[in-house]
Amino acid sequence: MLLPVLFNLNTNKIPQNKAKNSRLVFNTSYTYFNQPEKDIFVPTFKSNMLTFMQIQIKDKSFSKGSMTPDNPKWLQAIERYSPIEKKPYEIRSDFERDKDRIIHSEGFDRMRYKTQVFPLCENDMVSTRSSHVLQVTDIARKICRKLGLNEELAEAIGLGHDIGHSPFGHDGENSLKKITQKEGLPEFWHEKNSLRMIDKILTLTNTKGEQNNLGLTYAVRDGIINHCGEVDENYIKPRESAINLEKISSAGHVQPYTWEGIVVKISDKIAYLGKDIEDAYRLGLYNEKNRNELKNIVKKYIPDFSGDVNNTVLINIFVNDLIKNSDINKGIGFSKPVFDLMNDIKKYNYKNIYKLQNAKKLSQNQCDTIIYGIYNNYLKMYKGKDTISSLQNSQNPYTKNFKNWLIKYTDSPYRNKSLKNEIIYDISNPDEYKQAIVDYISGMTDKYAIKTYNSITV
């Protein structure tokens, strides 16, 4: 049966910005700072509460905290979860290798077709999970460059931070969370699933044709599971001690181990706030009233502001303020006005985008229908330790793919000798079989999840 999940949404309306007279003037000129090997463009405007006119770039102020070989945390930071192939004449750093292992994995490719906020969107200009991680990474690298932190580490964390996100964005995450709670499995949350993906599920083929786990470094793995920026606190510092990352039980309550992880955590929020506003405009969900409301929010903290509130403007405000106000003794954070501005915009987005009824082509109920349907139909295929054998003769391509997934991660007689990845399921245990289904669904793209549902649901 085909699931009727699509309905019409005008994705071609792009509200035009109409110039209005205002007694307050926003100076959109740029001040150019030229420092050795460090340049920055800073939007300049005056405010009684906030002044960017004479911003001081704290170039290299965090150098002693950068994750480099002279950092006391270095050996722990580069410790790998599992060994990776040693190559002669290797010119890449440990974190560069991690970055390469992430972007050449199937999990990274699949993010192109996973939802950021708006599922099944036909407008090609609206963000996907892939474009989001690239934007987070770009912002994080720029901040690290100005603060004297390790850009390569920030890049690897940024590119991998959402690699465990489910199809259909946070709605899909909610669906899988409800399944795991009902089944008594470890609760699903995407930060923890990203760690599971890079540690146990994603593989690469080495020079011998063998498939091995990614085996990333501790610092990258730590930054990925601890990237949640939804705990609203200013001036964050990294924790001092290394911990068992698999024992972290909830999102946002453990700070990253490195300054670079902190930067990615904050860059995540900087990246999505303005871009989600931009996407809402592109989809016709925001109008001139919304523009004026957002402008008034900004003017509350920056009285002289009179320009448009868009992604470019917000990134400039947040990044420049962060660089100006961060201090290795105090932590990475914002001035009070900009921190309050960020939280107010986040609240506005929640009210007017994320929780707005009919803002998405796919409702939470429809998302539940798809993901529950896939889960329950694969659950019906369970035959204990004989499950894989019973699936061998299936002609359904989506059932075949699931069977091959089980073979790859179980001690199956059908397992190819080239598979050297970790065995993670004993499917004679019903709970481990259920976990295999959850893991499998979490890696799906939006389109593949719908195709699977339509193919295996009777």
Image: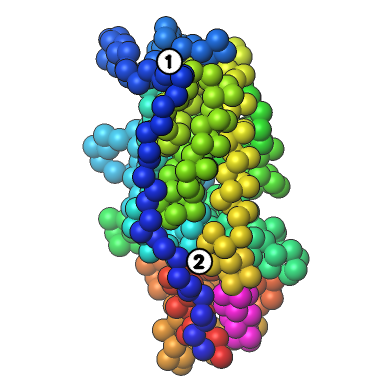
Amino acid at dot 1: Phe
Q: Residues within 10 Å of mark 2 (few under 14, many from 20)?
A: some
* Overall secondary structure of the magenta section: helix
* Local SS, label 1: loop
Kindly report which numbered mark, 2 or 1, lies closer to the viewer in this rendering: 1
| Front position in the image: 172 or 84 | 172
State the image coordinates of residue 428 (x, y, percent, origin top left). Answer: 66, 77
Name the residue: 36% across, 59% down. Answer: 12
Eyeballing the image, is 219 above or below 54?
A: below
State the image coordinates of residue 41 (x, y, percent, origin top left). Answer: 32, 19
Amino acid at dot 2: Lys
From the image, tell me which residue sits under label 1.
45
Q: In which quarter of the image is the C terminus?
A: bottom right
Task: Work out how far the residue at label 2 is from the one at label 1, CA to CA, in angstroms.
Answer: 40 Å
Residue 144, quarter of picture:
top left
Name the residue: 42% across, 91% down. Answer: 395
State the image coordinates of residue 318 (x, y, percent, origin top left). Answer: 48, 26
Q: Between disc 2 and disc 1, whose residue precedes?
A: 1
State the image coordinates of residue 384 (x, y, percent, origin top left). Answer: 65, 83
Eyeballing the image, is 128 above or below 314?
A: below
From the image, tell me which residue sits under label 2.
361
- The answer to whether any part of residue 377 appears in the image is yes
Eyeballing the image, is 457 above or below 253?
A: below
Which stretch did the figure color magenta?
369-383
